[in-house]
Amino acid sequence: MSKDLSDVIGRVLPAPENHLNTDKLEQARKARRSFMGKALAMGAGAVTGATASTRALAAEGEDAILKLPAHTTGLGQPVATLGYGAPSKWEGNLQRRQSPGLTRVPQASVSFAPLQGLFGIITPNGLHFERHHQGWWDIDPSQHRLMVNGLVKRERVFTMDDLMRLPSVSRIHFIECGANSAPEWGNVALPSVQYTHGMLSCCEYTGVLLSTLLEMCGYDKKNGKYVLAEGADGSSMTRTIDIERAMDDCIVAWAMNGEMLRPENGYPLRLVVPGVQGVSWVKYLRRLEVGDQKWATKDESVHYIDHMPDGTHRQYTGIQECKSVITTPSGSQTLLDKGYYNVTGLAWSGRGAIKRVDVSVDGGRSWRTARLEGPVLPKALTRFNIDWVWDGKPAVLQSRAIDSTGYVQPKINQLRAVRGTRSIYHQNAIQSWRVAENGEVSNVQVY
Amino acid sequence: MRTLILLAAAFVTAPAFAQTQPWHEIGRDATKAEVKAWDIDVRPDFKGLPKGSGTVSRGETVWEAQCASCHGSFGESNEVFTPIVGGTTKADIERGRVKNLEPGSTFPQKTTMMKVATLSTLWDYINRAMPWNAPKSLTADEVYSVTAYILSLADVVPADFTLSDQNIAEVQKRMPNRNGMVFHEPLWKVDGKGDVKNVACMKDCPVESTIRSSLPDFARDAHGNIQEQNRVIGPVRGADTTKPPPTAPVGSAPPPTVVVAAAKPAAGAPDTKALLAANSCTACHGMTNKIVGPGFNEIAAKHKGKADLEAYLLGRIREGGSGVYGAVPMPPQPQLSDADARSIARWIASGAK
């Protein structure tokens, strides 16, 4: 471009600082004062008028609209007041909570996610349920190591730096404790969905595929049939995973919903085993061993086993079968009035994607198919919604999920007919919520 | 010809494949000592079991010192964890199945010894996770001893027994529930079929007209006040479970009050820096640097030693001013409470640290 042209085409000149000298400043001030004086004189009448009309309207509207609150008339908070953010103080009711009497030692305990107040399918990290076997730790990531040993060509050690350099994936999956809904194998015992179903969360996990690590170490494809995952906390939690599972979609994950894992959820590294109960998602993961036999570790052969009616126990039962629950309205909530409700809830299957969710408002006598809200992902929570106009009469709400294998979520009596009533784990029955005339919703069992 | 093309393709893709895994050398080989330090698992075939041995009587000593406080002197305690010992008989040991797990049993608990099928599980868990508050502090011989003690309490071994890596496989043959476990593949494999079948009936479905089970009255507030566990806006509120449910139909009572159970702010002295941020003082003043106005440390330094500095600063904060640090004026801060303004003035007067 020629110099001439560049002069013609709008060249923006920077304003030199302090380009106004004292005379010019004084001139400008005078001009401004004179303008402001005129404006004030003009505005005075208008202000008086507004005040009068406000008074007139006071009987005709809500204070929330008519009285200007501090947040409209004052200066708000500056940016980055909270460097890592926090929810509104008005959301303080939604907390992870323990179930009194369920555990006797706080380090071998569980907290439940407040499903009754969550939206969509993603669980906020601060509300992701917790289960600890020997207390949680906030481990120094620079000192954390992952070892791969056993039936591999090269037994190897990875630092967090190493792992986070590897090609990564980010996938959304649900995690459900095998004991979720356990107290209700027998009779109804729990007041709200937080306690009946809250050992359930769903996040986007980021990490390296377990298959990538096993291939890098040259695992024995002929004899390597199982992988043992082991944690670095005091319990050194160990679980057996079969090699097909390990090579399919398991993730050695460091991140959850875009941030590093929280310490309560295994910082800096945990295993993600999609579709399989939470105890296999070993936290503080320190070691993976390839072997040719199952390990019969404590939590796959003494706990997390299913007591069958003939007195035997089923071992190595890890799949979380198709299940759903209505979260709004749900137990111990109160409907504010008759009329329209968007009944909403969550459905999931450890065997694949949710295909359909049906909802009944008459205790299972008749059903309508709900809307599935996207995304509908395999081994992830799926949100469903359905319209309901409540006439104020007693009702029993249920949801029934069907997964991509065609499996239909069972009723509690169907589950008991096969598995008896002495089990603890893998209770995936249809949940019933009774709505009373007073609007209160309560937990019931209906066959 | 086809073979030739395939072969050619193979020659081309082989190096290309290697090229797609340029991360392959990340990480390093584990040393033998490192693998030995961490590879502590013991399998049902006892692979991984270290050499060693322990007697029942030594086990009793270790037990009393390290285990009894949680598990009771005889592994029978239900105070902290479910009992370890109890509910098994000599007949169970003969059969390898625990009678008390079968229908008709009135035994109140499922103890560890009733359930555990493989002795390796017991050894491995004690070794890796016990004692509860000091995991991995027992020597191999102590783990053998404690295991022997538990086994003797359940009559699996006699009171004068010595358990070792040499005889553990023989003892396995006496585990009371060794034949009590089944493997149900469909609940292990993701592509398995479920064992319970429901059909998706849509209308006139067979259901009972009665409610089989409902929340007992005593459980209404067993989990606290559910009103404080629900959002304060939306189509529903949490029920006030500190009170009995209302008897009138919905809509006839006044709307529920808003109850927020948010954490209370920490007590103690006010945090001046939070106060400065909350009142936008930090929009114009840095802690140690000029932004629009001077840094707080600059103000403190400028007036250091001035008589009644706090009162002077309080006046400046309240009334505003100009000219001390240049032409840009500081506006008055009437929104600050007296206490907050004083707190800030005192903080600057004492050096702004």
Image (spheres, coloured by chain):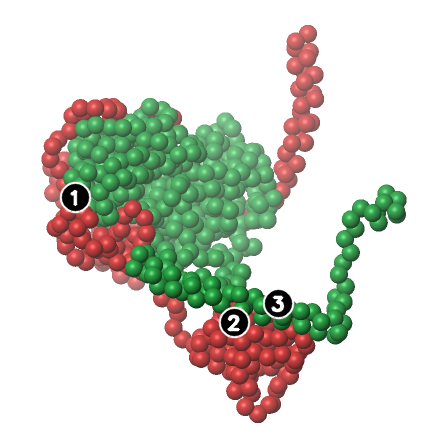
Q: Is residue B208 left or right of residue A301?
A: left
Q: Is residue B84 above or below residue A64?
A: above
Task: Give the Cα distance between marks 1 and 2.
Answer: 51 Å
Quadrant in the picture for the C terminus of chain A: top left
Amino acid type of the residue that numbered disc 2 sits on in the rendered structure: Leu
Task: Give the Cα distance between marks 3 and 1.
Answer: 66 Å
Report whether residue A46 is seen.
yes
- Residue under label 1, please give it: A436
- Residue under label 2, please give it: B276
Chain shaded green: A
Residue B328 lies, in percent from the top left, at: 65, 73
Amino acid type of the residue that numbered disc 1 sits on in the rendered structure: Ala
Report whether residue B74 is seen.
no
Label 3 resides on the chain identified as A
- Residue under label 3, please give it: A35
Q: Quadrant of residue B96?
A: top left
Residue B97 lies, in percent from the top left, at: 21, 36
